[in-house]
Amino acid sequence: MKITAIKTYPVNIAGRSQLNVKVETEAGIYGWGASGLTGRELAVIGALNHFRPLLVGRDARQIGAIWQDLYRGQYFEGGRVLTAAISAIDMALYDIKGKDLGVPVYELLGGKQRDYVECFASLRFSSKEELIKRAKILLKEGWKMLRLAPAEYEEGKFASVFEPRESIAIIAEWLIELRKEVGSAPVIGIDYHHRLTVPETISFLQRMPVGTIDFIEEPIRDESPEAYETLRKMTNVPFAIGEEFASKWQFLPYIEKGITQFARIDVCNVGGITEAMKVASMAESHYIDLMPHNPIGPICTAATLHVAAASPNFSWLEEMNTHVENPGLDDANYYPLQPKLEGTRYKLSDAPGLGVDFNEELAIKEGFKMVEAPRLKRNDGSFTNW
């Protein structure tokens, strides 16, 4: 079954950008994939333009061989742009093969090990009152795990200014109060989105009683495993790391050295389903659970559900489409066929392939504009991480 075309569809949905990729075959079967490199869609399209002549005419069923060719077929292997492009192709090839065989993708991965995929609710907040109010709404709706995303820098006269020491002082107080309000049962984590340093992270964690939070996600940047290893030795709070990792090799030191306790794998960035399953196996051998990153759209959600279904060491999938957040990235006008959230979890479908479809005509009609991530500065005018 030869590949006949690779088509790219960059789109703006709910104020954010997505890049979906369609792989077509001579048999009339097509597959969908997605890139997770939000904000750099044109760079990924450039990589896909390089890959296109290597793919057209190839057997779409040779997923592993194609992955190796795309990754190793250049002198400069890897990197987030290339693996985001490979991710989209890989997912689309699995979609094609599942449709060709008439089975859901998880059957190609050893079969499902669960009937449902449990999720955690992402909770963005900019004030203490908003935090507590939204948390109570989610808990009342049945959510058992909340991942908090502080955005206090969006409010007040100093909007778009982030001062780490000021932030950790108030956020620690708010979390202590939140825990008192909701009790000990809910699992609560916080994502500081790599805005802190090692000493700032320790200072933040030391300000709260033991048990206030159950994990902290990516408090510092991930380029240096050694820095994270130092941080790991200074606190007993579990870490969730990995949403920006672009290969199993990037995950390797974090898994082998026990730096992270949750692998925040992103199927749309790490190299697709092929690479995600290898990371899952590595993590399983070290008793590390998967907590997949999932902030893009339904194609990424669908692919991640199949990885979660086939992996024994799965904990929760990130879910942004809740009553308190709901950015609208799952717009049904663009995604007429997509996974459906049932309460706080997804029921696994037996539909062939990934179980998702995309409205190409609407994407072409609406066009695309580049979207940049927010920029944050310190009080002195210097740039800091968003």
Image (cartoon, grey):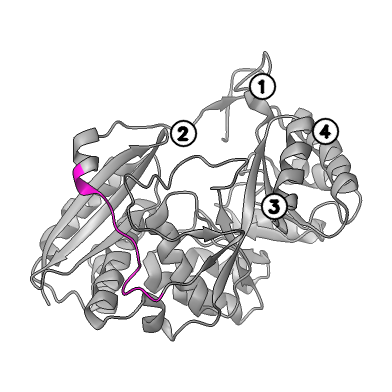
- Identify the residue position indicated by label 3 in the image: 141
The type of residue carrying mark 2 is Ala
Of labels 4 and 2, earlier in sequence is 4
Task: Check if mark 2's residue and mark 3's residue have beta carbons within 8 Å.
Answer: no
- Identify the residue position indicated by label 4 in the image: 169
Q: Closer to us: mark 3 or mark 4?
A: 3
Of labels 3 and 1, earlier in sequence is 3
Of labels 2 and 1, earlier in sequence is 1
Q: Closer to us: mark 2 or mark 3?
A: 3
Mark pair 1, 4: CA separation: 16 Å
Residue in view at x 74 percent, y 55 percent: 231
The type of residue carrying mark 3 is Glu
Instruction: Say if residue 18 shows up in the picture.
Output: yes
- The quarter of the rendered structure image containing the C terminus is top right
Residue in view at x 35 percent, y 68 percent: 354
- Identify the residue position indicated by label 2 in the image: 373
- Identify the residue position indicated by label 1 in the image: 155
Mark pair 4, 2: CA separation: 25 Å
Mark pair 2, 3: CA separation: 31 Å
Mark pair 3, 4: CA separation: 30 Å
The type of residue carrying mark 1 is Glu
Of labels 3 and 4, earlier in sequence is 3
